[in-house]
């Protein structure tokens, strides 16, 4: 995990994107664009060559943000390549939860350093995923003018980038959504020491901690194929999504659907609890193919290759 550090400088909240340094063309004929490329080169050197010898606070003081109105035909990956800056830095600064369709009337903010911008409050599934994997309470809020509205507060992690799962959620949105709007990942998919038995065993899903009664939503359109109770999962729901894919939601305190109900992605299906074999309120969430639990990264990638 890349250590988390925070940008010390502030941009006035009254300042809008139009008052940031503005790039008119992604061409070396544009003086401001040439300056931006110089800033990017310096930023990359600071992050990758001189960090951590120079303190992170000193490095991020050199961060600059530019504004660019997209030209016809522009798209994120082209801009990223032309600017020599990773697309995840651009995406998280602009708060895009998926690959955007750019508008010539909406400025794109371009950071001069690679890294991940984490907003004060997560709104999209992607931001919630980023939030849960990097922690929520270290450091102080910073303000970036013109970012998805005036005075947006972020945390900045220099040199960080999307994980494979985050990259998938950005490139292929809407295949599966996270079943909770707010959560803390307490146990990932894979081998672990079971908190119940104390032995190493395979954990076939994600454990997402949340307060008792938190709303649980369907991860994708489908039909409820199980709405029951078991000794292991407690109250639980299984939704069949077609193509041999299912999702499972365990340890619920209450069910909000019945067997054979047809649900849409985002339909309320139950509430977080601690029923069955559970050490505290959380949702056990699985995605399965042909009845076998799959690592979400591999499952989602295979679905879209």
Image (cartoon, rainbow, N blue to C red):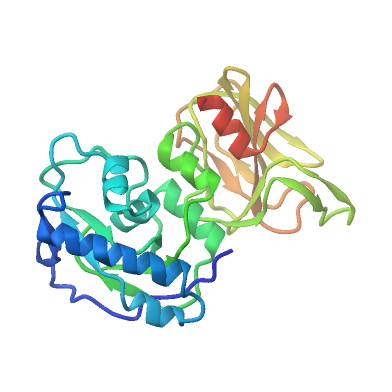
Q: Foreground residue, 274 or 40?
A: 40
Residue at 38% of width from left, 52% of height from top?
Answer: 86
> Total marks drawn?
0
Residue 120 visible in this rendered orientation of the protein: no
Question: Is residue 124 toward the left or the right of residue 276 in the image?
Answer: left
| Position in image of residue 3 (x %, y %) | 54, 71
Q: Foreground residue, 237 or 137?
A: 137
On the image, which quarter does residue 264 sit in? top left
On the image, which quarter does residue 101 sit in? top left
| Position in image of residue 136 (x %, y %) | 50, 67
Q: Determine whether 69 is above or below 40 in the image.
A: above
Q: Foreground residue, 199 or 81?
A: 81
| Position in image of residue 29 (x %, y %) | 10, 52
Q: Determine whether 60 is above or below 106 in the image.
A: below
Residue at 49% of width from left, 59% of height from top?
Answer: 131
Residue 46 visible in this rendered orientation of the protein: yes
Q: Residue furthest top?
A: 243
Question: Is residue 171 toward the left or the right of residue 211 in the image?
Answer: left
Q: Quadrant of the N terminus?
A: bottom right
| Position in image of residue 160 (x %, y %) | 48, 60
Question: Is residue 292 toward the left or the right of residue 302 in the image?
Answer: right
């Amino acid at each position: 995990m890349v250590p988390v550090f925070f940008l010390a400088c502030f941009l006035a909240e009254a300042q809008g994107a139009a008052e940031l340094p503005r790039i008119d063309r992604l061409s070396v004929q544009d003086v401001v664009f040439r300056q931006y490329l110089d800033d990017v080169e310096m930023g990359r050197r600071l992050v990758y060559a001189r960090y951590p010898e120079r303190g992170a606070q000193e490095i991020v003081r050199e961060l600059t943000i530019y504004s660019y109105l997209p030209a016809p035909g522009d798209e994120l990956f082209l801009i990223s390549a032309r600017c020599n800056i990773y697309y995840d830095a651009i995406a998280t600064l602009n708060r895009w939860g998926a690959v955007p369709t750019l508008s010539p009337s909406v400025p794109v903010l371009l950071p001069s350093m690679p890294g991940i911008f984490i907003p004060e409050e997560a709104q999209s599934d992607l931001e919630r995923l980023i939030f849960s994997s990097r922690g929520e309470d270290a450091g102080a809020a910073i303000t970036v003018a013109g970012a998805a509205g005036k005075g947006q507060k972020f945390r900045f992690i220099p040199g960080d980038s999307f994980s494979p799962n985050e990259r998938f959620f950005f490139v292929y949105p809407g295949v599966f959504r996270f079943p909770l709007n707010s959560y803390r990942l307490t146990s990932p998919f894979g081998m672990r020491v079971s908190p119940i038995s104390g032995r190493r065993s395979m954990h076939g899903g994600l454990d997402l901690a949340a307060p008792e009664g938190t709303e649980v939503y369907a991860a994708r359109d489908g039909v409820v194929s199980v709405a029951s109770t078991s000794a292991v999962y407690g109250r639980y729901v299984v939704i069949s999504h077609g193509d041999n894919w299912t999702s499972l939601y365990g340890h619920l305190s209450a069910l909000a659907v019945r067997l054979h109900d047809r649900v849409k992605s985002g339909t309320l299906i139950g509430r977080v609890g601690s029923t069955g074999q559970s050490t505290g309120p959380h949702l056990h969430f699985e995605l399965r193919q042909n009845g076998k639990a799959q690592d979400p990264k591999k499952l989602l990638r295979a679905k879209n290759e």
